[in-house]
Amino acid sequence: MSKDLFEAARNAIGRCHAPYSQFPVGAALRGDDGRIHAGANIEVASFPEGWCAETTAIGHMIMAGGRRIEEVAVIAEKKVACTPCGGCRQRLAEFAGPDTKIHLCDMNGIVQTVTLGELLPYAFDSDALT
Ligand code: THU
């Protein structure tokens, strides 16, 4: 059931700090223990130093003791079905698998569900470092 995940992502938008882009984003992850971790994008005046909602959510999951992502929801106030950026796809891949569902939302709910493998084929992963 992904409605609670969607609602966590939508609520997270309210915490965003996006004064420069005016493009609020929320994300929520469900860990393999069932807990939900949410995040919003956080921008800074030195533009490249800001970071995405998905990255905030991953940080919350890690600091709460989680390690595996089962499901993700992403929502942007101004774009239907906003997809995670390239960097966030790689960060998600660190803690999720190619079959992990990524729910792309609008303000009313999930509009499309894709897998991380579809978003990041031929991912660079830790196997490459062994
Ligand atoms: N952004 C996210 O938070 N997640 C995405 O998946 C795409 C982009 C943010 C970063 C920046 O604060 C704003 O959206 C505009 O790029």
Image (cartoon, grey):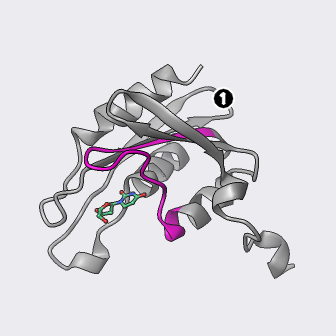
Q: Quadrant of the N terminus?
A: top right
* Residue that mark 1 sits on: 33
For the residue pair 107 and 26, the one nearer the viewer reads as 107
Is there any visible trace of residue 65 in the rendered image? no
Ligand 1 quarter of the rendering: bottom left
User: Could you tell me which residue is drawn at 14 percent across and 74 percent down?
Assistant: 45
Q: Secondary structure at mark 1?
A: loop
Q: Amino acid at mark 1?
A: Asp
Q: Quadrant of the C terminus?
A: bottom right
Q: Quadrant of residue 32?
A: top right
User: Per the image, is 80 magenta?
Assistant: yes
In this view, 55 is above or below 108? below
In this view, 20 is above or below 35? below
Q: Which residues are magenta?
A: 71-88
Q: In the image, is 96 to the left or to the right of 21?
A: right
Q: Quadrant of residue 121?
A: bottom right
User: Could you tell me which residue is drawn at 23 percent across and 56 percent down?
Assistant: 23
User: Could you tell me which residue is drawn at 55 percent across and 41 percent down?
Assistant: 72
